[in-house]
Image (tube, rainbow, N blue to C red):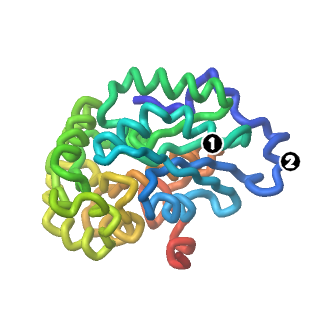
Amino acid sequence: MYMSADNPTVAGVPPSVRRSREYGRAGLFGLLTPQGNPVAEPELRILLPAAGAMLAARLTSPGPTLRERLIDYREHLGEFVDQFDDVAFDAVGFACTGSSYGIDADEERRRLDAIAARKGYPIVTAADAVEAALFELGAAAIALVSPYPGWLTDACRGHWQRRGLRVTATLQLAPESTWGHGIYALTTAAVLDAVARLDTRGADAVLLAGTGMPSLRAILALEPLRGVPVLSSNLCLGWALARVIGDTEPGPESRLYGGWTARLAAA
């Protein structure tokens, strides 16, 4: 398991720098999200500490296909981080789980460490955050809910199996014909309707994959019904970023990370 936030070569932001900020004295976070994603920023703003601040930038690519864009986002991650210039973040989140499925974990680790050492703050990927959350909860088997086209669902499942997890069931939400903005057109009602068919027997957790799928209201509804933790890429990324400043506790919303019900209700 890897978390850039634990990289010993990254000193982190000194308390004096935090105190000198106009905004974000309780945490300043950067977020990089795919160019068409309308969900990651609202959900991360709900999840991150209320007294913190978040700055976002878009991952962009001229690639005509999803496969090409995911590669571009990954290959040019350092350049995307540099869009923030010299902002002294506590951490930056890479809100694109799909880009991590197609790269060797050790190679991604080397790249993230190099960027973090250069910038002076950790870079936390959504995929790393999910893995860390599963480890935190002691989950070794997952039931997977995928909003991806078939080829990316296969890559997602293969990624988690290579990371040592057992995938007990896979539910694909978006048919091939809807891809383009299929993931971004999903609603909580559609997710709940689909997940009602998911077999969670033998699973230690349910994973709602993809930062572009709305997940927070679904988590509120599903976790009490399913009897196991229900996680999403955004929930785990919000938890992992907040953990950098030590602001994470479970709550009634989630066995992983709570305290965000009021912010969700106002969204």
For mark 2, give the secondary structure.
helix
Secondary structure of residue under mark 1: loop
Disc number for residue 121: none
**Mark 1 sits on what residue?**
83
The residue drawn where x is 51% and y is 72% is 264
Amino acid on which disc 1 is placed: Gln
Mark 2 neighbour class, 10 Å CA radius: few under 14, some 14 to 19, many 20 or more: few
Residue 235's x, y, as percent?
A: 44, 55
Q: Can see residue 252?
A: yes
Q: Which of these two is toward me, 13 or 36?
A: 36
User: Which quadrant of the figure has residue 50?
Assistant: bottom right
Name the residue that disc number 2 marks. 20
Residue 252 in the image, given as x and y percentages of width and height: 46, 66
Q: Mark 2 is on which residue type?
A: Ser
Q: Is residue 59 above or below residue 217?
A: above
For disc 1, the neighbor class at 10 Å (few under 14, some 14 to 19, many from 20) is: few
Q: Are marks 2 and 1 in contact (CB under 8 Å)?
A: no
Q: Is the residue 8 above or below the residue 41 in the image? A: above
In the figure, 49 relative to 203: above or below?
Answer: below
